[in-house]
């Protein structure tokens, strides 16, 4: 096509965007005549213009979290970037804001799209259909894995991986029109699923077993097998409070129970150590904040024996 950019031109665009938007982006590979372009990079949070670069770009978030708000000539995008989330940049100008992230991008030329659908005997997606797909962030584990493999072996973009991988991506994104069951649409993926009662019990058991030391949110998240970010959201959705507050409250209630049942010979400093506080002053402040009075005063007022 006469308006297809060469690899050198695409690299120049990457450099100009890096200068304008503090973006560190590299051209990893390109297929013949730049019909396919693979880029990988990272950028800080930014807002600004996006220009129509002829290709349709599939974007995969590798690291980073944050809200995306972009308005293109042909689509309006709202959603949250996080690892594994993908989106399509439509063939149109636009502007918006994006969070800091590391990303991979596969640029697919209109010739490749038209050629694939001609080969399978289907009409290619219209500009409106591409824009409609661009308006929704989504997850697709298979497409994600194909992009990851392309990053691992960029030299094969002009070979079997590029040809078959791109064909499968186009099939997943456009050929199965009207069937989004295989895609985890990010509007649904953003829905917070609270932890189950069983998972909360597993967390309580872990806290009880490690009461005498500091327990981190990362440790609790590992019990469930999710990231700290997702764990905190799901935990709060179930309990109504963030993990660190729940953990502190549980420890302080345990300390209060000890003070009620133990003799005066078991001092506040010793009790603080029992729940993982190395500094008695820190324990006293936390206890007073929760119960409204210092530990010694609370102990006198609530002593059972």
Image (tube, rainbow, N blue to C red):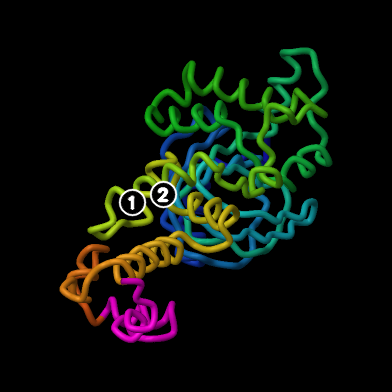
Question: Residue 215: x and y, percent?
Answer: 30, 56
Question: Residue 230: x and y, percent?
Answer: 51, 50
Above or below 275: residue 234: above
Q: Magenta part of the protein: which range? A: 282-305
- Residue at x 61%, y 64% (from the top left corner): 97
- Residue at x 55%, y 59% (from the top left corner): 66
Above or below 260: residue 99: above
Question: Residue 166: x and y, percent?
Answer: 58, 25
Q: Secondary structure at mark 1?
A: helix
Q: Which residue is mark 2?
A: 204
Are there few (<14), some (14-19), or many (20+) residues within 10 Å of tag 1? Answer: some
| Residue 101 falls inside the magenta stretch | no
Q: Which residue is mark 1?
A: 208
Image quadrant of residue 58?
A: top right
Above or below 197: residue 12: below
Secondary structure predominantly adopted by residues drawn in magenta: helix
Any mark on residue 44, and which? none
- Residue at x 75%, y 17% (from the top left corner): 118
Q: Residue at the far front: name it.
A: 305
Distance, label 2 to label 1, CA atoms, is 6 Å
Question: Residue 35: x and y, percent?
Answer: 58, 31
Quarter occupied by the C terminus: bottom left
Question: 130 or 184, which lies in front?
Answer: 184
| Residue 300 falls inside the magenta stretch | yes
Callout 2–callout 1 Cβ contact below 8 Å: yes
Quarter occupied by the N terminus: top right
Q: Secondary structure at mark 2?
A: helix
**Left or right of 129 on screen, residue 9:** left
Question: 217 or 284, which lies in front?
Answer: 284
């Amino acid at each position: 096509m006469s308006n297809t950019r060469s690899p050198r031109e695409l690299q120049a665009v990457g450099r100009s965007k890096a200068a304008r938007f503090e973006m560190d982006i590299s051209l990893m590979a390109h297929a013949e005549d730049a019909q396919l372009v693979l880029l990988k990079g990272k950028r800080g949070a930014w807002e600004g213009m996006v220009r129509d670069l002829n290709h349709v770009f599939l974007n995969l978030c590798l690291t980073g979290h944050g809200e995306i708000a972009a308005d293109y000539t042909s689509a309006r995008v709202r959603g949250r970037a996080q690892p594994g989330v993908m989106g399509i940049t439509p063939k149109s100008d636009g502007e918006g804001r994006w969070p800091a992230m590391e990303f991979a991008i596969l640029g697919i030329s209109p010739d490749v799209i038209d050629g694939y659908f001609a080969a399978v005997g289907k009409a290619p997606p219209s500009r409106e259909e591409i824009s409609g797909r661009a308006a929704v962030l989504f997850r697709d584990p298979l497409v994600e894995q194909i992009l990851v493999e392309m990053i691992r072996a960029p030299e094969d973009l002009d070979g079997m991986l590029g040809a078959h991988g791109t064909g499968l991506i186009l099939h997943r994104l456009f050929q199965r029109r009207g069937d989004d069951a295989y895609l985890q649409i990010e509007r649904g993926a953003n829905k917070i699923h609270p932890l189950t009662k069983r998972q909360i019990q597993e967390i309580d058991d872990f806290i009880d077993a490690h009461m005498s030391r500091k327990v981190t949110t990362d440790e609790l998240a590992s019990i469930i097998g999710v990231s700290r970010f997702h764990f905190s959201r799901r935990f709060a959705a179930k309990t109504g409070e963030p993990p660190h507050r729940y953990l502190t409250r549980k420890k302080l209630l345990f300390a209060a129970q000890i003070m009620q049942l133990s003799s005066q010979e078991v001092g506040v400093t010793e009790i603080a150590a029992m729940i993982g506080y190395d500094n008695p002053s820190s324990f006293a402040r936390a206890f007073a904040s929760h119960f409204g009075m210092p530990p010694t005063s609370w102990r006198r007022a609530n002593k059972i024996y």
